[in-house]
Image (cartoon, rainbow, N blue to C red):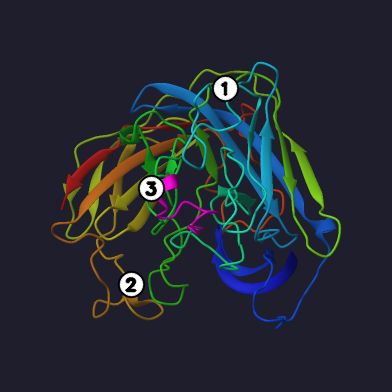
């Protein structure tokens, strides 16, 4: 693959990113190539527990960054793997990215598959060919021969290499999931105990004004929750960046020492009230900070309130719906309601014991942000979601 400079929103940043694109099928026409050194890129990984109040399970949370010196995603495609300590084991029957159980089941590792031609059956791993690690977290956004740049709202759904409409893939890890993102915890036994989480306004700057790539749905929250029992010890992430014109470089990072698998208490959202296009309600928080994720399942919009550092009340402002033109959300003549009558929504609070929001793009441009909190882990707790119709 060749590293290209391309303006797009991918992973967690709507910025100029240097990345990795697949082989071309454009009859020999070669785009301008910029090949900065990969040696300056840095990979980080941290682990913790994830408590899912919806089903009472405790799994493994993985947080990773793979960034250039300016904080942008290091590449646009890579192949990651996560190897745990001797006590860590992927459960038997754990789903792959495709139709059957992952080859990782029964091993100490969670792996991805090398990219292949779209007519070739990929290796049946947990993360598949389309999952990479980017500026903040793992995501199904690997570029390929079909599209150089994917982003939340335009994920890699290439049949064969992705989780598109092919019948063979509908029973896999991403079967039936929204194309905007993936639902977590990955591998949860019941879809009802999974949620879809992207960071949107007001926690991040407003982007639904027509100035972002079409369909951009939000920024990555950085965490990847696996419904796999955590084990104490350190974890290693290895990442390969495949190139077509030279040796494929690899990166490796070792996590913090996971010393405790005790779950973080779950935050709780109380009875919600409509707010002229928004929502408000009481919340009991835990951990260091809590984010409230609101998904409008009718429109596909994502909103986030926080970070909240104490229990109290949260409020989704009433006028953050899509509008046209820079700063349109601030003018009465152009602003639109966040939620409209008939919209169904899901509100899910998630607590963290590390600076999850502070580490996130677009605000954070550090190459190596801190991925653990005062306890030395990256623990999260997903509260019971509250659903409704506006």
Q: Quadrant of residue 6?
A: bottom right
Q: Nearer the viewer, residue 155 or 144?
A: 144
Report the Cα–Cα distance between label 3 and label 1: 25 Å
| Label whose residue precedes the other's in the sequence (2 or 1) | 1
Mark identifier at residue 230: 1
Q: What x and y, as percent, mark residue 221?
A: 50, 48
- Which numbered disc, 3 or 1, marks the residue closer to the eye? 3
As helix, strand or loop, the secondary structure at mark 1 comes to loop
Asked whether residue 284 is in view, the answer is yes
Q: Which residue is mark 3?
A: 177
Instruction: Tell me what residue is drawn at x 67 percent, y 65 percent.
Output: 22
* Element carrying mark 3: loop
Instruction: Give the distance between the C-alpha atoms of the residues marked 2 and 1, in whole angstroms.
Output: 43 Å
Which residue sits at x=65%, y=16%?
87
Disc 3 and disc 1 in contact, CB within 8 angstroms: no
The residues colored magenta run: 156-169
Q: Is residue 78 magenta?
A: no
Circle 3 Cα neighbour tier, 10 Å, few/some/many (<14 / 14–19 / ≥20): some
The answer to whether 286 appears left or right of 387 in the picture is right
In front of the other: label 2 or label 1? 1
Q: Residue 41's x, y, as percent?
A: 77, 55
Q: Secondary structure at mark 2?
A: helix
Badge number at residue 329: 2
Q: Main secondary structure of the magenta part?
A: loop
Drawn side of residue 13 relative to residue 304, left or right: right
In the image, residue 3 sits, relative to residue 353, either above or below, namely: below
Looking at this view, name the residue that lies furthest to the left: 341
* Residue closest to the eye, 297 or 356: 297
Residue count near mark 1 (Cα–Cα under 10 Å), binned few <14, some 14–19, many ≥20: many
């Amino acid at each position: 693959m060749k590293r290209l400079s391309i303006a797009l929103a991918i992973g967690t940043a709507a910025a100029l990113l240097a990345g990795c694109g697949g082989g071309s099928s454009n009859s020999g026409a070669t785009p301008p190539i910029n090949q900065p050194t990969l040696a300056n890129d840095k990979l980080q990984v941290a682990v913790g527990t994830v408590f899912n109040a919806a089903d009472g399970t405790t799994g493994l949370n993985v947080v990773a960054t793979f960034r250039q010196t300016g904080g942008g995603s290091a590449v646009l495609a890579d192949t990651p793997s996560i190897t745990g300590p001797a006590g860590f084991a992927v459960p038997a029957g754990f789903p792959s990215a495709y139709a059957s159980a992952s080859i990782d089941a029964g091993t100490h590792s969670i792996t991805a598959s090398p990219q292949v031609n779209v007519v070739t059956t990929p290796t049946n791993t947990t993360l598949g060919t389309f999952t990479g690690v980017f500026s903040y977290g793992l995501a199904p956004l690997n570029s390929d021969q079909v599209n150089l740049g994917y982003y939340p709202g335009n994920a890699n759904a290439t049949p064969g290499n992705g989780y598109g409409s092919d019948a063979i893939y509908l029973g896999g890890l991403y079967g039936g999931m929204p194309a905007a993102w993936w639902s977590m915890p990955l591998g949860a036994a019941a879809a009802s105990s999974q949620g879809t989480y992207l960071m949107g306004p007001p926690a991040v700057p407003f982007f639904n004004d027509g100035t972002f790539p079409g369909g951009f749905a939000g920024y990555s929250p950085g965490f990847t929750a696996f419904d796999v029992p955590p084990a104490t010890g350190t974890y290693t992430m290895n990442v390969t960046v495949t190139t077509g014109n030279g040796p494929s470089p690899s990166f490796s990072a070792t996590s913090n020492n996971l010393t405790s698998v005790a779950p973080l208490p779950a935050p709780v959202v109380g009875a919600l009230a409509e707010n002229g296009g928004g929502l408000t309600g009481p919340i009991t928080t835990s951990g260091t900070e809590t984010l409230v994720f609101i998904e409008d399942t009718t429109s596909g919009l994502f909103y986030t309130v926080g970070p909240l550092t104490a229990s109290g009340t949260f409020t989704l402002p009433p006028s953050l719906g899509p509008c046209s033109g820079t700063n349109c959300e601030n003018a009465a003549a152009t602003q639109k309601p966040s939620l409209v009558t008939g919209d169904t929504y899901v509100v899910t609070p998630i607590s963290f014991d590390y600076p999850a929001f502070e580490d996130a793009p677009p605000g954070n441009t550090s190459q190596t942000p801190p991925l653990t909190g005062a306890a030395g882990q990256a623990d999260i707790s997903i509260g019971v979601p509250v659903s409704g119709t506006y």
